[in-house]
């Protein structure tokens, strides 16, 4: 196990400074390239921060004395052509069908994709030196900490369930899942950032990867026919059709539980923080500005306390999602489970 580096060495490392620069850049880009929330009530506007926002290119300012033309949606929304995706995830740019005569549909980029990309870049920054550290024992403080976390996941999560021979094959996937979720959760705690895992579409995609791993790997190891045959335990033949339906529903419920658990926990934590902060605006609206200022120390104090708990929840939910994925995949490749 790698020794725990001191906080000073960890923060002063070039990797940490690069990670900090990436976080600041992502927050700046997100805050300057989203349409700002507008609502008559600041209390209601506060809760709109949980809503994903499309990234836009702000139109250039008009020259003095020249009236600037109002750009249409296709002129400033950041989007990529995506006819290959289902219509649920894409849309034509413009006010109506006539604005897309070619039938081209686009995937509109949001602040969620921005912080998903940030999570990927943070994984690359912190883990790019781990292979060399494993071979030579050399590396800076963030590398040693990342290697320690990876070793803990291997020895305490993957190998005890799947054993070394099979676990070593699945270890890269579970490492990616854990740290990708962890960095998305932690990024959502930064001021001005968005929590990608508070979107059910993101958690559904993560759960889908686990579901596909269960089905594909189970069929690859057991065989396509044997996998579905072993799905039902030994029961009387008359009960087999009913038990097959029950087991099939159970197979679908597992990734569904992963999706809802991660989404609900991350969304719920932010709702609690926003609710405490919303008390300031609520009392100001109902009883005047003095009441809002009076309740603000208590509201901010409770919000900070919940944010401290949220930092623990960010790690816990990455652990729970990964550990359950390990159990589900292991059960699929071992019919006796």
Image (cartoon, rainbow, N blue to C red):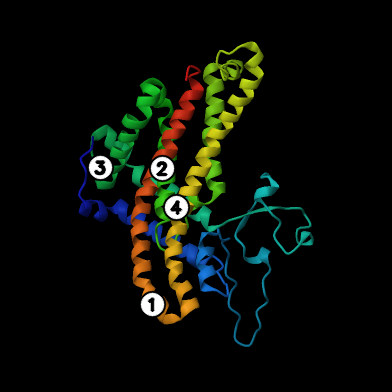
- Please give the residue where the numbered disc 1 appears in the rendered image: 293
Taking the spot 37% from the left edge, 45% from the top edge, the residue there is 315
Of callouts 4 and 3, the N-terminal one: 4
- Give the CA distance from mark 1 to mark 3: 49 Å
Tag 1–tag 2 contact (CB < 8 Å): no
Q: Position of residue 93 (x, y in %)?
A: 69, 60
Q: Position of residue 94 (x, y in %)?
A: 71, 63
Q: Can residue 94 be seen from the camera position used here? A: yes
- Secondary structure at numbered mark 2: helix
Q: Position of residue 145 (x, y in %)?
A: 27, 43
- Give the CA distance from mark 4 to mark 1: 36 Å
Mark carried by residue 118: 4
Mark carried by residue 139: 3
Of callouts 2 and 3, the N-terminal one: 3
- Give the CA distance from mark 2 to mark 4: 17 Å
Of callouts 2 and 4, the N-terminal one: 4
């Amino acid at each position: 196990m790698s020794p725990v580096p001191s906080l000073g060495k960890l923060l002063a490392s070039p990797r940490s400074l690069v990670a900090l620069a990436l976080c600041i850049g992502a927050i700046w880009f997100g805050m300057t390239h989203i349409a700002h929330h507008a609502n008559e009530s600041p209390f209601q506007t506060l809760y709109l921060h949980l809503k994903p926002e499309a990234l836009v290119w702000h139109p250039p300012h008009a020259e003095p004395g020249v009236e600037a033309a109002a750009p249409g949606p296709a002129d400033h929304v950041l989007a990529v052509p995506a006819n290959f995706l289902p219509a649920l995830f894409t849309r034509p740019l413009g006010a109506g069908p006539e604005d897309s005569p070619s039938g081209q549909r686009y995937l509109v980029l949001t602040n969620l994709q921005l912080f998903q990309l940030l999570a990927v870049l943070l994984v690359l920054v912190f883990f790019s030196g781990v292979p060399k550290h494993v071979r030579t024992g050399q590396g800076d403080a963030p590398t040693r900490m990342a290697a320690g976390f990876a070793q803990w996941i291997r020895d305490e999560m993957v190998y005890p369930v799947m054993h070394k021979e099979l676990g070593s094959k699945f270890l890269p996937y579970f490492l990616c899942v854990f740290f990708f979720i962890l960095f998305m959760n932690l990024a959502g705690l930064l001021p001005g950032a968005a929590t990608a895992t508070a979107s059910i579409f993101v958690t559904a995609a993560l759960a889908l990867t686990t579901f596909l791993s269960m089905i594909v790997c189970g069929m690859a190891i057991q065989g396509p026919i044997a996998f579905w045959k072993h799905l039902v335990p030994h029961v009387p033949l008359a009960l087999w059709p009913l038990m097959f339906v029950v087991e099939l529903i159970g197979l679908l419920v597992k990734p569904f539980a992963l999706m809802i658990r991660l989404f609900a926990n991350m969304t719920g934590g932010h709702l609690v923080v926003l609710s405490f902060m919303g008390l300031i605006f609520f009392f100001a609206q109902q009883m005047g500005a003095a009441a809002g200022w009076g309740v603000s120390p208590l509201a901010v104090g409770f919000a900070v306390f919940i944010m401290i708990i949220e930092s623990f929840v960010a790690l816990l939910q990455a652990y729970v999602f990964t550990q359950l994925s390990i159990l589900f995949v292991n059960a699929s490749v071992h019919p006796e489970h």
